[in-house]
Image (cartoon, rainbow, N blue to C red):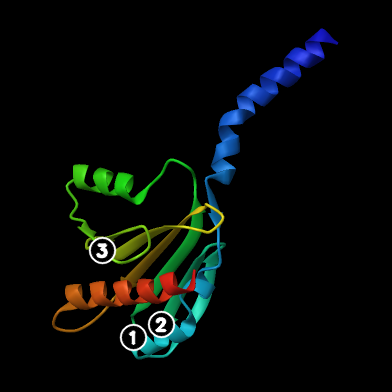
Amino acid sequence: MHNKFVALLLCSVALTPFADVTTAQTPLDPEKAVTLSDVQGLLEGKFTARTVEPGLVKYEEVGGPREVEVSFFIQSPGKTVSGVKQGILQNGEPVEDVTGLGDAAIYRPQGVSIIVEKKSKAGDLQWLEIRVHDVEGADKAATTKRLAVELARLAVARY
């Protein structure tokens, strides 16, 4: 009996680090945050939506190169946008604060993405990340940022 108890205790201790891996991020529905209609209207084109995995949808332009990726999930405790920003800066990557979105938001020019953090009414830390790819035109960088920020504004208004 004692050996069974010890074995059970050792197994539970050995598996404890893996418990956090499965609960690190809880996916939410990104298609409710940023809709197909939002993408088609703002980017002025025909797109299709494809769920890549729970919490991640990709909008792909029909016959074109442009893509919008939207991930939406509940973040694990302890990880914050400000903490991510510090890590990005330490790696020498530029990052810009975006005001007026959620509780905190940053834009990563090299990653062409915006990350928005907002606490839900239930107290969960929700993260929305939007990446806009393959924008064409004279000022691709500014247009890409504008599109990502505008899509984020639409999404934040919904959740």
Quadrant the N terminus occupies? top right
State the separation of the CA atoms marked 3 and 2. 20 Å
Q: Do tag 3 and tag 2 residues touch (Cβ < 8 Å)?
A: no
Marker disc for residue 39: 2
For mark 1, give the secondary structure.
Answer: helix
Q: Is residue 135 above or below residue 24?
A: below
Sequence-wise, the earlier of marks 1 and 3 is 1
**How packed is label 3: few (under 14 Cα within 10 Å), some, or many (20 or more)?**
some
State the separation of the CA atoms marked 1 and 3. 20 Å
Residue labelled with disc 1: 43
Q: Do tag 1 and tag 2 residues touch (Cβ < 8 Å)?
A: yes
Residue labelled with disc 3: 98
**How packed is label 1: few (under 14 Cα within 10 Å), some, or many (20 or more)?**
some
Marker disc for residue 142: none
Name the amino acid type tagged 3. Val
Farthest residue to the right: give it: 1
> Residue at horizontal 46%, vertical 63%?
71
Q: Is residue 125 above or below residue 140?
A: above
**How packed is label 2: few (under 14 Cα within 10 Å), some, or many (20 or more)?**
many
> Residue at horizontal 34%, vertical 80%?
66
Tell me how many marks there are. Answer: 3
Q: Position of residue 21 (x, y in %)?
A: 54, 41
Name the amino acid type tagged 1. Leu
Farthest residue to the top: give it: 2
